[in-house]
Amino acid sequence: EAEMEIAELKMLRFSLGVTRMDRIRNEYIRGTVHVRCFGDKVREARLGWFGHVLRRDREYIGRRMLGMELPGRRPRGQPKRRFMDAMKEDMKLAGVREEIAEDRARWKQMIRCDDP
């Protein structure tokens, strides 16, 4: 996500005609063009899809895959980030629980991150 935010800010700076040499803070640039952090937008999209899958039928293959655990051990070293690990982190940041996903309107309202 950090690399995407860097690329986003490069594009915003270019569109505003601002260079790094002008030493203008990122928050000021985002406020000028009225956009939220790219990571927030990605989190909103992920949580939106996750809520959609949770509202589907229990026999839906996407929903079955969410709860699936692979047999065996994970390899040595730092564990790779799994989708459900990212979902748990995103839900914690947004302050939502899986049970809320059944109420679509409330779920959308809670995960929404508006542009300033």
Image (cartoon, helix red, strand yellow):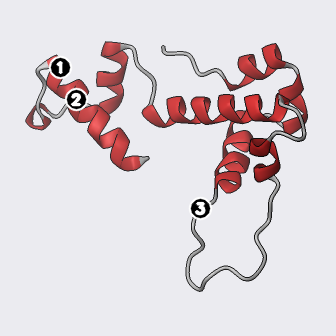
Say which residue appears at 78% left-offset and 23% top-offset: 107
Residue at the spot of label 3 = 81
The mark lying in front, picked from 1 and 3, is 3
**Would you identify the image quadrant in which residue 14 lies?**
top left
User: Which x, y percent locates residue 6?
Assistant: 30, 42
Say which residue appears at 45% left-offset and 24% top-offset: 36
**Would you identify the image quadrant in which residue 96 lies?**
top right
Residue at the spot of label 1 = 15
Asked if the residue under mark 3 is in contact with the one under mark 1, i.e. CB atoms within 8 Å, the reply is: no
Q: Which of marks 2 and 3 is nearer the N terminus?
A: 2
Q: Is residue 47 above or below residue 68?
A: above
Q: Is mark 1 on a helix, strand or loop?
A: helix
Residue at the spot of label 2 = 11
For the residues marked 2 and 3, what is the alpha-carbon distance in whole angstroms? 28 Å
Q: What element carries label 3?
A: loop
Q: Depth check: 12 or 25 in front?
A: 12
* Callout 2 amino acid: Met
* Callout 3 amino acid: Arg
Q: How crowded is mark 1: few (under 14 residues within 10 Å), some or many (20 or more)?
A: few
Q: In this view, does 65 lie to the left or right of 35?
A: right
* Callout 1 amino acid: Ser
User: Which x, y percent locates residue 108?
Assistant: 72, 19
Residue 45 seen: yes
User: Which x, y percent locates residue 68?
Assistant: 80, 59
Q: Is residue 96 above or below residue 31?
A: below
